[in-house]
Amino acid sequence: MRDQYLIAQVQREIASVVGPENVNTDETLLHEQSADWSWISQYLKYKSLPVPTADIYVRPGTAEEVAEVLRIACEYKIPVVPRGGGSGTQGGTFAIYGGIAMDLRRLNKVLHIDEVSMIVTAEAGIEGPELEKILNAKGLTMPHYPGSFHFGATLGGYLAARGSGVVSTKYGKAEDLVLQLEAAVPPGKLVETMKVPNHASGPGIMQAIVGSEGTLGIITKASMRIERIPESMEFLSYGFKNISEGIEAARRIMTDRWRPAVIRLYDEADSAKLSSWLNLGVEGVLLIIMCDGKKALTALESSEIAKLCEAVGGKSYGPEIGKMWWDGKYEPFKHGNIPAPPQVFGTTDTCARFEDLEKIYWAKKKVIEEGFSEYKARYTAHFSHWFPWGGMIYDRFYIDNGPEDPQEAIALHDRVWDAAIKASLDNGGSLNEHHGVGLKLGRFMRVQHGAAFDLLLGVKDAWDPDGILNPGKLGFGPPKNGRY
């Protein structure tokens, strides 16, 4: 009864800030706010099992309301779990300690388009397609098109998990596109970072908030780089005898400092899957490349890249396969193509230097397919995003017939993750490249960072002394308040 009274009291105080219509305790709505696209969330829904939910749902409409709700939460020491479109895959919106589920989707305005500096400033809750529609009307684009583009992903979500997009090889990830942030931080105040990301004015506060998944601050506004819609797009596609040749072709492209917008390298299994979805009619290891920009630039760049690919042993399929891929780039994320329970699956993406990429691929393939052979586990991969120093592996495991018992199925899921993460880290990879950490991977944070993780814990304690901002995520542990 004391808990019920406390929740009712907090709800009334929040209602005075955001309006009674924007706060409630409806059980169905609270379940929706806790859910995301993680396997565990989908599996619990499939099994009609409950997900951990908050106690109060709130939908602020301005940055000032976000800060004021956070102030109330700080006074009562109640957790706050911010949420955008719920397209995350790591259990980042699970409210395992209850508290307030903060829906940011009313913060959905474009505030300013600066065509002189090529910067757009928008509120954090705007969805990617809506922002793109507004920019496209002016011949502009924000070059960040993630697989979650049509799953409700928001600007704040892009930044909270350091997301990658289809053309990040040329334009950078969300963390590279952002120039300035506004965020609500304890004990309920708004802070704004510098107008420029490059400076010599001490450590970068903005990049501490980016990737923090709501554990250090709640992003309310961001200024992002934009580009003109490209004048020209040139497509190439190549087949290779093996994954080694494909990786070497991509390495040469990047280390020769060509800048294609897209380099996608598919192993045999992922290539077969992609070919069936898009009717490509190819098999084996497939490499897709797209160069964009001024026509003179794309003509030169595609010509030189073609020479590199052929020198490594690539067989050209011509531009049409690449164009078909571009037109169907969201096909793998459509319902019916994305994996779903009762299948046990996970996307264990990692990034590494060029010298480590291939050994990570083989190590993970072995540990999954041989280590879980009794379940007929399968491993597929493509290399999605590339850097001047290395690349990223977007890989998945699949177990078609897992245990029927929920606890056994969840335990199997976690064991495969344990093995996959260990193989990545033991061979020079990272915990993750662009899906974030959330609740699911928090247990690996100290393994990834070693003694440096204590520095992150110190930042968390200093910025959020009560531990109420999205507790339990990023390996940061529970709130300090015993009530939760």
Image (cartoon, grey):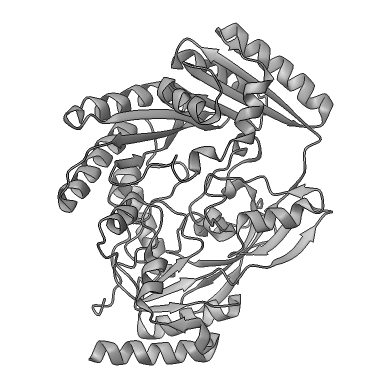
What residue is rendered at 42% in x and 68% in y? 33
Question: Could one spot residue 465 in this view of the protein?
Answer: no
Picture quadrant where residue 433 is located = top left
Eyeballing the image, is 208 above or below 34? above
Q: What x and y, as percent, mark residue 30?
A: 38, 73
The image shows residue 277 at horizontal and vertical percentages of 50, 31
Q: Residue at x 29, y 42 (%)?
A: 343
Q: Viewer-proximal residue, 191 or 381?
A: 381
Left-right relation of 258 to 184: right
Name the spot of residue 108 as percent of width and height, x first: 63, 67
Answer left or right for 410 relative to 365.
Answer: left
Screen quadrant of the C terminus:
bottom left
Query: Is residue 380 left or right of 60 when viewed as pictured?
Result: left
Residue 227 on image: x %, y %: 75, 45
- Quadrant of the drawing holding the N terminus: bottom left
The residue that appears at 59% across and 27% down in the rendered structure is 263
Residue drawn at point x = 63 percent, y = 28 percent:
324
Residue 11: which quarter of the image?
A: bottom left
Comparing 78 with 403, the one in front is 403
Is residue 163 something one can see in this rendering? yes
Left or right of residue 93: residue 314: right
Above or below, 75 against 431 in this view is below
User: In the rendered picture of this protein, how many numbered marks are placed on residues?
Assistant: 0
Q: Is residue 29 above or below residue 477?
A: below
